[in-house]
Amino acid sequence: MVTAMTSHMTLPVFNLIPREQNGRVFYEVKFRYAGRQVMRRVGRAWLEPDAETGSFKARSGRVQPGYFDSRAAHVRAAEIIAGYVAEKQDAERVAEERRINGATFREVAHAYLHWLETVKGAKPTTMRSHRSLLAEPGTPHGRGRRKTAGYIMGALGDKPATKVTTAEIEQVLRTVAKAGVTPRTVNHYREIICAVFNYGMRPGAFSLPTNPAKFADRRRAAAPGVLVFYTYDEIEILARALARGLHRPYGYERLDAEVEEDERDAEAVRVSAYAGVRMGELLALRWVDVDWEGSALTISRAISDGLETTTKSGQIRRVPMGDDAAAALERLTQRRHFTHPEDLVFCNLVGRRLDASALRRRFKRARDAADLRPLRWHDLRHSYGSMLVAGGIDLVSVKEAMGHAQLTTTSRYLHARPATELAAKFTDALRSTGATSALLADDESDP
């Protein structure tokens, strides 16, 4: 084995040295490599102290398993040195390749994730999404035994970032598309790769010369459909279904604590729909954020991937608190515990934060039990925006209440505004040409 390992390399000269430690004698090998002295332990030596010379001498009898005599120790020492030299040469080769080709895509991607989290302060949910798409193949994902496919790292991770081509990125996107995902998801993969290269091009980062992902084709994604939303009556039906425990097994006798939980969930639906708060904002809401005299909610924090952070936009906003939202919150103040200003508005029976996934599951079961349209929890927020616009509230006011960064986002709710008034104006405008046309016809008929 040592011959096969060392036949292609010249080993440095070494010395085999016996040393005694705690009454045991070991062989150690000492050698120099790249100007540095190295010592490695070989193993137990088949030696014993020699009282006459003050050194060591070979023990009598057959060498026992786990021990080395002089010849076996030299062979093992050569193997150890060969392994050390091979490891160092491999590291030197990698360093040379890095010097010539630059960092790998994996290194750039990891640096990008660190920058995104520590410098840009990305939300925990954003970081989880990015880490998932940039994970290695086979990385455990979510609950259960699911593992990530690792499309990006599997194809590009080991390649020098400067050598990655647009064609290779296109192949990654084709592989993702074959998995049966939507064009929007494929485009999301493209955006992540593009973001990694954009970071790598920054001065002081990796100074990459170009971004090959920029030239990869985007998939044609379907235009956003018309937002669907619940009406006021449907929201009340849903809230009452939760309060009555219709999401629980048929005929189930609820405990008092369960009745309280169900009523709390009903008010959570109402506050979401009548104040337009996101799920994360709802779960982070505290009583100190409720301004009873000013009829407003202060939305300053949210829960993201289980952690309390700022709102999605990073801004604090005040949401006008209408009578229905105020009534829901007022009913919650009647509970026996957890009404201190710093307590959570929506909490479990021991005052801790609710689990968003569990709340969504109860919502869906109550929705189905009430035979309502299969909308999501987030559609309660869409219902808020749609009902406001339908009721004639101007877009700027709706934008501020919902915390949108752009007015174009709020304009999606215009579909809910009845066209009756505008249609009447259109009719008057079209008919106004009628009188002029009649006069022209009369003039042309005069001899």
Image (tube, grey):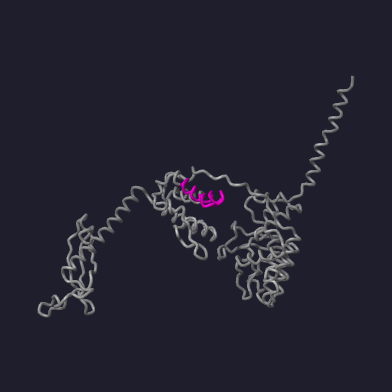
Quadrant of the rendered structure where residue 88 is?
bottom left
| Residue farthest right in this picture | 447
Left or right of 40, for residue 217: right
Residue 138 spot, x, y in % from top left: 45, 60
Dominant secondary structure of the residues highlighted in magenta in the image: helix
Q: Give the range drawn in magenta.
A: 169-189
For image coordinates 20% across by 63% down, the residue present is: 78
Left or right of 139, for residue 53: left
Residue 259 spot, x, y in % from top left: 69, 74
- Point out the image quarter for the C terminus: top right
Residue 319 spot, x, y in % from top left: 69, 60
For image coordinates 46% across by 46% down, the residue present is: 171
Indicate whether residue 144 is drawn in magenta: no
| Residue farthest left in this picture | 52
Indicate whether residue 180 is drawn in magenta: yes
Q: Quick check: can you spot residue 355?
A: yes
- Point out the image quarter for the N terminus: bottom left
Up/down of 282 relative to 227, above or below: below
* Of the pair 411 and 238, the residue shown nearer to us: 238
Q: How many labels does the image show?
A: 0
Residue 414 spot, x, y in % from top left: 71, 49
